[in-house]
Image (cartoon, coloured by chain):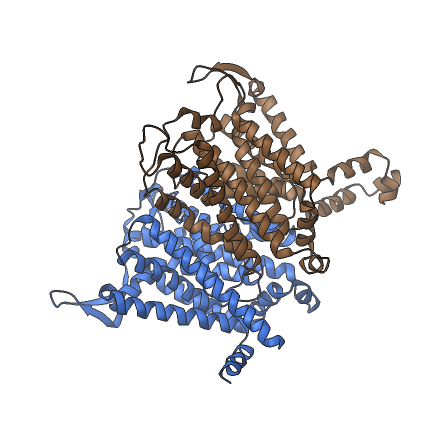
Amino acid sequence: MKEKNKFNIFEKMNDTNLLLTITIVIFFLMYIGAVLFQGGGFSKPQMFFNILNANAALIITACGMSIVMISGGIDISVGGVVALVSMCCAVYLDKTNSPNILVSMLIAVGIGLLYGLVQGFLVAVLDIQPFIVSLAGMFFARGMTTIVNTAPFNVENQAFVALKDTRVNVPFLGSYNKKGIYVPAYIEIGVIVALLIVILLFVVLKWTKLGRSFYAVGGNRQSALMMGINVRRTKFLSHLICSTLAGIGGYVYFLHVGSGSASHAMGMEMNAIASSIIGGTLLTGGVGNIIGTFFGVLSLSTIQNIVASAGLDEAWWTGITIAAMLCIFLLIQSVVMAQKKKAIKT
Amino acid sequence: MSKQSKGNILGAFKAIASHQLFIPILALVLLAVVNLIVDPSFFEIKDVTNNAGYMVKSGALITILDYGSELAILAIGMTLVTAASGGQDISVGATIAIAGSAMLRVLCGGNSRPDTIQAPIIVAFLVACIVGMLCGAFNGMLVSIFKIQPMIATLILFTAGRSIAAWINNNELPIVPDPKFAYFGGFIPGIPIPTTVFIAAICIIIIALVLKFTNLGLYTQAVGINESSSRLNGINPTFIKFLSFVILGLCVAVAALIKVSRLSTINYSVIAKDIEMDAILAVALGGNALSGGKFNIWASILGAYVIQFLTTTLYKFNVPSDALAAYKAVVVIILVVFSAPKAREYMEMFVKKLNPGRKEAA
């Protein structure tokens, strides 16, 4: 009887909600586990906000990645774009006369847009596999970053540093330090940008024609075409949005680290893909959720923090645990989806 | 239209252009011509005395054959994986680190500075093969049994691989004391051609024989084109996919032998970095569909050497190694755009628009 009930729930939920629920439940279990067994830092709200602060850029790029993945593509150039954006902005702010912060933001978004236009054109109009296009895009961005400037350096522009150090206090969630002084919890500006983007994209994906067409194209290209959706335009837009978000994410990243370097955001594309998958986006397309991606990023960085605070700080443990977690998530997804298919069939 | 133009030069050109080997060969010829114009000494092959005091051949072409061999070996496995599973293995670089690390662990026996090697080289190589195949089997299991997309399944080892490699040797960098070990990535005394060329040749011959005398190639294509119909025809798609990943694991072990032997040591974070991208590019340059199905292993191998040719050419033009990627990307995009069927269609339409009288004339 109980078994039957379980399957009923499976039947009622669609793929997106099922995977999303799994992700959120696992994230909370993990975080509660961390608080219970490690205590210390994890019980303070600031720990959570620090995770947000450090990963605002990843949240933004992972959201873009999810949109591309939902519409059935992939973009592995985002890490390169982030590095390129931070290097270009750093050079602009530090090596030119009378730089303007607003112009540097425009540069960031402009680079993202340009990347999106080129990659979207190659993928949607010329029908080249997105993997190859963005692979070349990644190479190009990484190479261009070193061509723009080889040596890493910190930006000392005052207006920028002021913006970088701006902290938004979160009410009621501060903590008392050892001397008993109240320390308010804070988030950086990047986090606000990231949260706004998450909400905006959630609304777009859920309630607009464009958002639904991403799902339709990713789910089944042929039937989307028959439904009268402009598949080419949808694909183009998915890449445009992803690269633009990578540009914005690049600026947020730049705002967090405050320097330009060719080795910035190494492997960020893989983290973004991993977050999307943990968040329940399927690489085959058609299934995914922005909220899931958000929790995917949180899960990924929580596990990193757990590993770091458990004293296993030898570098290799981080890689191995993230991989192990990814593996577990993938297996759960795979098993659950298989169960669901069986449940529907019988 | 095609009947009319058949027999004349245009038709013949079209037939050649649509052949799968056309793009890699065209790229090779283009690169060769550019080099010939800029600096004809590119093609010189000189006899020089190497560090060990033997006469060896030296020159850019030898370098290409030498350093292209790992890529060519990986391209063999990658082509099979791509054809069978319709996805790519992005963990090959990390798996090279694991297999190489295991090899060093066996050779040096846990001591990072041994005076003699602790086990015969062949044993170490066999261990590396087993480790490589296990990694391949892990990927293969995730892809074939759990039906996870290949790129995502291999993302696991991609993330963990270099960490596992460091963990095998306790993050130490053992140095192999035996000069014989360096033969595999360098020269055997008395033979002026790099050993890697022979290793690559042996691998290519083996895969050629396998494809010739077994049904592996046919089954792989069948699974890649349509999994369900291949199952109805009595092929086990799960096994074929699994097998392709194990074969790639074996290729990775051979590549690891070469890579580790070149230096007689290992650097976990740098060894074979980005080689997975080059291997996938080799497959794509060879005109193989990255979504699986029909494949041409010769085109992939040729593609691997084209990429190495490009890399060596760029180095000749004093491009710094960090900036190499940007130039590579431009070349790759140009090649891919020209080989894309859609782009060709547009170009044909454009040519027709330019001279509408052409058809009547022909």
From this view, report whether residue B123 is shown above or below residue A273. above
Residue at x 50% of width, y 37% of height: B255
What residue is shown at x 52% (from left), y 72% (from top)? A206
Rendered position, A41 above or below B118: below
The reply to whether residue B43 is in sight is yes
> Which residue is depicted at the point 56% across and 78% down?
A11
The residue lying furthest to the bottom in this view is A1
Q: Is residue A140 visible?
A: no
Q: Nearer the viewer, residue A82 or A156?
A: A82
- Residue B175, quarter of picture: top left
Q: Which quarter of the picture shows residue B333?
A: top right
Query: Relative to B229, does residue B102 appear above or below in the rendering?
Result: above
Residue farthest left in this picture? A179
Q: Is residue B310 left or right of residue B124?
A: right
Instruction: Find residue A114 and report its horizontal and vertical position in percent.
Output: 52, 50
Q: Position of residue A342 (x, y in %)?
A: 59, 73
- Horizontal side of residue A173 vs B96, given as left or right: left
User: Which of the image's four quarters has the C terminus of chain A?
Assistant: bottom right
Residue B297: horizontal and vertical position, in percent?
65, 40
Which colour denotes chain A? Answer: blue
The one nearer the camera, B174 or B163, is B174
Residue A195 horizontal/vertical position (percent): 39, 66
Q: Of A129 and B165, which appears nearest the observer? A: B165
Chain B tint as drawn: brown
